[in-house]
Image (cartoon, helix red, strand yellow):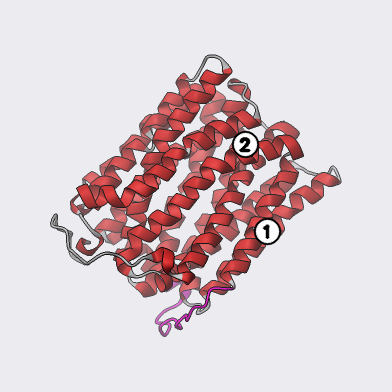
Amino acid sequence: MTAATDAPTDAGPPPALHRDRRFRTFWISETISHFGDRISELALPLIAVTLLTATPVQVSVLTALIWLPNLLGLFLGAWVDQRTHKRRLLIIADLIRAAVLLSLPVAYLFDAITLTQLYLVALLTGFGAVLFAMARQAFFVGLVPRSAYVDANSKMSMSRSLSFIAGPAVGGGLVQALSAPIAIVVDAVSFLGSALLLSRIPVTEPPPPPRRTSTLGLVREGLVLVLRHPVLRAALGCTSTVNFFTFIAGALLVLYASRELDLSAGAIGIALGFGALGGFAGAALAPRVSRAIGLGRTAMIGAVLFPAPLALTALVSGPTWTKVAMLAAIELVSSVGVMLMDVNLNALLIAVTPDDALGRRAGAYSAVNYGIRPLGALVGGALGTTIGLRPTLAIAGLGGVLAVLWLLASPVRHIQTIDAA
């Protein structure tokens, strides 16, 4: 594939995706699932912190286990590429996560929740998420025309951002009213709803091309593609760097807000929910900004704007309303940045990957990009224990800014449009 040029290519306006019933159903399915996820993201660490009196290291291990299965993406991606029925895999992934999450409220009713069970739930739901992600990109390509990749990613990112706006506030309220384990039922039901909607999408899935090599050979192909392609390599370096540092902060944020800032679950939910307004705005603006200044430049701005505000988390202090307002403002700016980066880079990754290699490319990419997240979480727990939570959060925000250097030193900074890649 050739390097991009600065001149945009006019491919005509993208199709009206909201009028496409198949894409609309897929979009609604993901939206429902995202709203459920926001509850579990708050409830799982709160179960560890409040019911099981977990230490910073134990909370960081919980976060790490959610992302650890991404290391299996190398093999799952190659395996998924050889499967014809990607929709079936998406449904199976949803059902696995629903069943595993329902084990927590059942154990709670019998007063039998343990840290070991919480770790297993994190690990198995993480596996379901990886399986879903590996099959999702091939399914996405079957639903969305190439010219609409950025628009489709923008719409789905807007839904995800809306879930971050309302989800934490609703989740915090549910946790306070029902307890964290019972609130997780909502997330389990959301996965069941997602599976039902996916089963209703009519789709023709062509069989994969004849197998040319072993599974290990396909794994190697995925790694070679990601590491040798200049755009994929730069995007991977950028997202892996920013994820490592932001997960140092993410693993400790709920603990920091709960113990050091002395905020209730409801107050934490309100702060994160209001801050997520930035994600909705960023997702909505991403296509417009990329058309105005170029896809690559927009992604670079996002790569700085996402981690930089997290350093200010270390300065949060004052009365409760001030602490909530400061956290909300930090999350607001950071959420704009992550969407400017994600929407454009995700569309770019799909565009430069051959259709028959989407699974193994996603597997190789996520094995590194997501596999580094547990490491970031564990480093966060270790630093939080040794030097304190505030210095650790400052290091995380400042270190994350280094991610933009990968894009600056690559062809990505010159890419104006998808067709220019």
Query: Could you tell which of marks 2 and 1 lies nearer the N-terminus?
Result: 2
Q: Quadrant of the N terminus?
A: bottom left
Say which amino acid is labelled 2.
Val
For the residue pair 113 and 57, the one nearer the viewer reads as 113
- For label 2, the residue is 59
**Residue displayed at 54% across by 31% down:** 271
**Residue displayed at 63% across by 52% down:** 123
User: Magenta span has 21?
Assistant: no
x and y percent of residue 314 in the render?
47, 22
Nearer the viewer's eye, disc 2 or disc 1? 1
Say which amino acid is labelled 1.
Ala
Locate residue 292 relative to residue 184 in the image: left or right: left
Q: Quadrant of residue 88?
A: bottom right
Residue found at the far front of this picture: 19
Residue found at the far right of this picture: 110
For the residue pair 201 and 409, the one nearer the viewer reads as 201
Locate residue 407 relative to residue 199 in the image: left or right: left
- Magenta-tinted stretch: 200-220
x and y percent of residue 116 in the render?
72, 45
Residue 364 vertical position relative to residue 305 in the rendered view, above or below: below
Query: Mark 1, residues whose alpha carbon is within 10 Å: few (<14), some, or many (≥20)?
Result: many
- For label 1, the residue is 98
x and y percent of residue 210 in the render?
42, 85
Q: How many marks?
A: 2
Locate residue 314 relative to residue 2 in the image: left or right: right
Helix, strand or loop status at disc 1: helix
Q: CA distance from mark 2 to mark 1?
A: 22 Å
Query: Mark 2, residues whose alpha carbon is within 10 Å: few (<14), some, or many (≥20)?
Result: many
Is residue 374 at least partly visible in the picture? no
x and y percent of residue 274 in the render?
50, 34
Q: Quadrant of the C terminus?
A: bottom left
Residue found at the far top of this picture: 318
